[in-house]
Image (tube, rainbow, N blue to C red):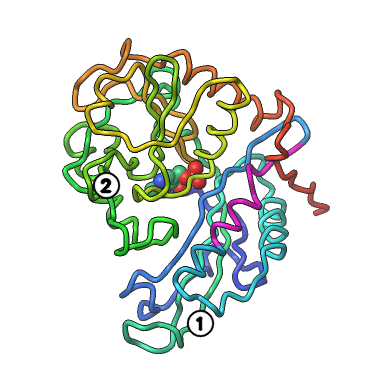
Amino acid sequence: MLKATEKIWRNGEFIAWDDAKIHVLSHVVSYGSSVFEGIRCYETASGPAIFRLPEHVRRLVDSAKIYRMDTFQFTQAELETAILELVAVNNLRSCYIRPIALRGYGAMGVNGMKNPVDVYLACWEWGKYLGEEAMAEGVDVCVSSWSRIAPNTLPALSKAGANYMNSQLINMEAVANGYAEGIALDKSGYVSEGAGENIFVVRDGKIVTPPLGTSVLPGITRDAVLTLAKDLGIEIVEQTIPRELLYIADEVFFSGTAAEISPIRSIDRITIGRGRRGPITEVLQKEFFGIVNGTIADRHGWLSMVPVHAA
Ligand SMILES: Cc1ncc(COP(=O)(O)O)c(C=O)c1O
């Protein structure tokens, strides 16, 4: 259950958590017209630190542009400042942050371009998405019977609410069948991504991940993994992945803001590698968590420190 915080930001002002409501006839409710972000803020010795804030805000602005949300009235800089302020006013040391832009109340009909675009920023305390134990032991997943959204239908580079109807089908089927998550194939049958995570496959010391264009979200943690692997001298390439490579991999792991870096120990009940977190996943986790927790130098400038709020 969501743990309420004090304030939510709406169109430039802070309002009470309980007042962040929309009309049932808002465009987004019937037509799915929203774009959003998921961002993590970590507790460090120097205060709360938001991971890759500019990159997340940029993706939100990009997501809106793809959907012609031209009335998007806030700049990148304004949104970054508002998000830092949001965490400060809610007095949180660590949290999950959810910016949302949606087509609101006004006209009714598919088009939506006459409806206002309302922007909300909310945050709340949140733990590990796939569970603490999963970070070391790995999770059991399946290949979904549902394909990922196809190119030129719902654009995968936009993090739109509507894309998550596809993600829900993938995740609900997986969970109903006793798995932690589902992996979707793209329209050509190549590995795409999890319902809410990018995926990486390790074989013979080399990492591969599906390229943009295989219906993947351009994950910000995915980009961090690509960067960290290069830093550590591990070969990493973006390449289409046939389904069966999953089964014969030495290691497979997910990346995402929610999932962070999560090992996969079995796929479709086939054991991956030794059936637990592998050494490359572990070394990437160590580096990632070291940086976000502030114990390893933030050499790429990925952390935005939240100003301590003068109450
Ligand atoms: C479908 C999908 N793929 C990948 C990701 C990972 O992206 P990121 O690392 O930016 O959170 C997410 C999470 O936002 C997602 O929902």
Q: Is residue 245 above or below residue 198?
A: above
Q: Residue at x 59, y 28 (%)?
A: 228
Q: Is residue 135 visible?
A: yes
Answer few, some or many: residues within 10 Å of disc 2's Cα (few below 14, many 20 plus, some between 14 and 19): many
In the rendered structure, the answer to whether residue 217 lies left or right of residue 119 reads left
Q: Amino acid at mark 2?
A: Asp
Residue 186: mark: 2
- The magenta region covers 47-60
| Mark identifier at residue 116 | 1
* 274 falls in the magenta region: no
Q: Nearer the viewer, residue 255 or 134?
A: 255
- If you read the primary sequence from the N terminus, does the residue marked by circle 2 or circle 1 appear first? 1
Establish whether ligand 1 lies closer than 8 Å to the Cβ of label 2. no
In the image: residue 151, left or right of residue 85: left
Q: Would you say 157 lies left or right of 215 here?
A: right
**Residue 254 appears at what percent x and percent y?**
41, 32
Estimate the spatial distance between the alpha carbons at disc 2 and disc 1, rounded to whole Å: 34 Å
